[in-house]
Amino acid sequence: MESQDKAFDARAFLQNLGSDPGVYRMLDRMARVLYVGKARNLKNRLSSYFRDRDQLDAKTRALMSHTESIEVTRTHTETEALLLENNLIKEHRPRYNIVLRDDKSFPYIHLSTEERFPRLGFHRGAQRRKGRYFGPFASAAATRDTLNQLQKLFRVRQCENSFFSHRSRPCLQYQIKRCTAPCVGLVDEKAYARDVRHALMFLEGKSEEMIDELVQRMESASQTLEFEMAARYRDLIASLRRVQARQYVSGSGGDVDVIAARSGDGVGVIELFVIRNGQSLGSRTIRPVHGADASEADLLRAFLPQHYLSRTGRKRPVPDEILLSADVDDVDLLERAITEQTGRRVPVRSNVRGERARWIAMAVDNAELAHRQAIAARTDLRDQFEALRDLLDLDDIPERVECFDISHTGGESPVASCVVFGHEGARKSDYRRFNITGIKAGDDYAAMRSALERRYARLQREEAPLPDLLLIDGGRGQLQQAMEALEALQIEGIALAGVAKGVSRKPGLERIVLPDRKESLDPASNSPALHLIQRIRDEAHRFAITGHRGQRGRARKSSVLEGIPGIGSRKRQRLLSEFGGLQGVSRAGVEDLMRIKGISRELALLIHGAFREAS
């Protein structure tokens, strides 16, 4: 606190504060935001930070030891303060706030109702396409599971339009009875529309009405001696009953989110159950950043505004009711903020009875399971980090490990990846990719040197955390590049190791190359340290390959289609859509290309010739 007093005149600062509501931001000496908080009374709230050091908890003491200045924004109401606090946390992701790790949009099922033969598909992001959207589902796995059920039950197509419009015979989905092959006319529009309507009823939670209709159709088919059709309806009804028994959490409808939190042993988890029209759309486990030492109520208090209150231009669907596993302060404030955003009242409750209490108990059970699994995974990971320290003979257990890899195809479009791991696992927000230019094609040493210099020169400028251990995917040559790059930047204190593949290049036979040892380390295939190294190296490899493929794909599209005179962006997009991608265009004949609107014979010959030359 003494250093704080020298750098910051707390008394003068507090004297000038009023009793208004507002938001405060605590900054370090580099003006980076360390913490964002809201206050009903700014003066009272901020005064609590400047009490005697012994009266502060460990987290607050650590925060104040790094705080060099405080910025304050007054607001008219507490609701405005809550909204501003939420936006600032999402923007800055301060290290002392509990921050949601995953801020992606939730997935939906999209039905393209405007088409002659509508398609069911997985959708995430802005809802710009025409049609109906169902969800949000709690996870991609739950969405795909529902799509799989729909395909079995109603046989509505799920293929892309580019695939659908170029079929000359039924695909495998027809053979395994998951599609009626409208692409080749094996089902008429009326029958297909009936399947689409049944899928809609299922997604709208009207399964009982649909089953009643199917029972009538089954009886009618039986009376007219159409026994095969009657058997089809019978099987469909039985399948619907089985799915209904798995999906329905109660007999009543309604949209409800059920949220439970568990914390302890340095791990915090949040379990979110999504219920729409009385159907469970799955659950999602969320591991907040910096939530390890927070209480259950603190986790819920941080989660609710970040999850439900919209950021600029981005809204997340809000259910009719939110159920919590514990009481949370300022729930009325959150309700007011949601009301302002949605135009309707959304109750947030924890003290409920009957079926809602059972839903909360279900969420709590799953949160406890996720919490136990997280603790077990963290324990295993901690053991691996300890084994890594012993294997590499490090003084301390590394807190932060970075790993680099290079990916290219014959020297084309080289991309370097940097992945970061800590004791909690992968830190994906710290991952970085580097597009490598200005080097000789296939020169992995120069590519590695370039990526390392760019990475650590920037970390030096920003005074960002450096790794305790740097892993390089490669042998002695790549490791030498890392040593020279760090030496040129005058960076010391980072342990280095190269991960070289064995003679047969099989997993488990890796050799670990160290700067100060001529002989490589050959850990046993069941070594926990080797398993951790493999996991980090494989993640760096995956991240590099993903980036390289994207870079290579963009380069190839540009070099072939964009280099043809007379092919603008619209024609290029039309070609890619109609043929299902660049590979389809490359395989098309001149006559096939001429069928595309705007492609003359002369232009088709140019396109065909350009791809022949490129290959």
Image (spheres, helix red, strand yellow):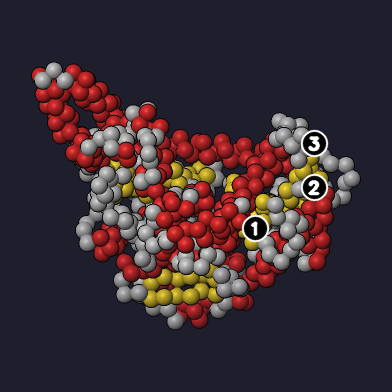
Q: Residue furthest front?
A: 601
Q: Give the vertical position of 65 relative to 252 (above or below).
A: below
**Count of picture labels:** 3
Is residue 570 depicted above or below 284 in this figure? Answer: below
Q: Residues within 10 Å of mark 3 (few under 14, many from 20)?
A: few
Disc 3 designates what residue? Answer: 503
Amino acid at the residue labelled 2: Gly
Q: Secondary structure at mark 2?
A: loop
Classify residue 574 as left or right of residue 216.
right
Which of 355 and 534 lies nearest the eye of the viewer?
534
Between 537 and 190, the one lying in front of the other is 190
Task: State the separation of the CA atoms marked 1 and 2.
Answer: 22 Å
Q: Amino acid at mark 1?
A: Ser
Q: Quadrant of residue 354?
A: top left
- Amino acid at pointer 3: Val
Image quarter for residue 217? top left
Residue 566 placed where, x, y %? Answer: 47, 67
Residue at numbered disc 2: 475
Say which of marks 1 and 3 sits in front: 1
Quarter of the picture holding the N terminus: bottom right
Tell me the residue at 36%/72% (across/down). Answer: 21
Residue 346 visible in the current orientation:
yes
Residue on which disc 1 sits: 413
- Please report the residue visible at 32 percent of the width from the left and 36 percent of the height from the top: 181
Give residue 239's position: percent from left, percent from top: 27, 26
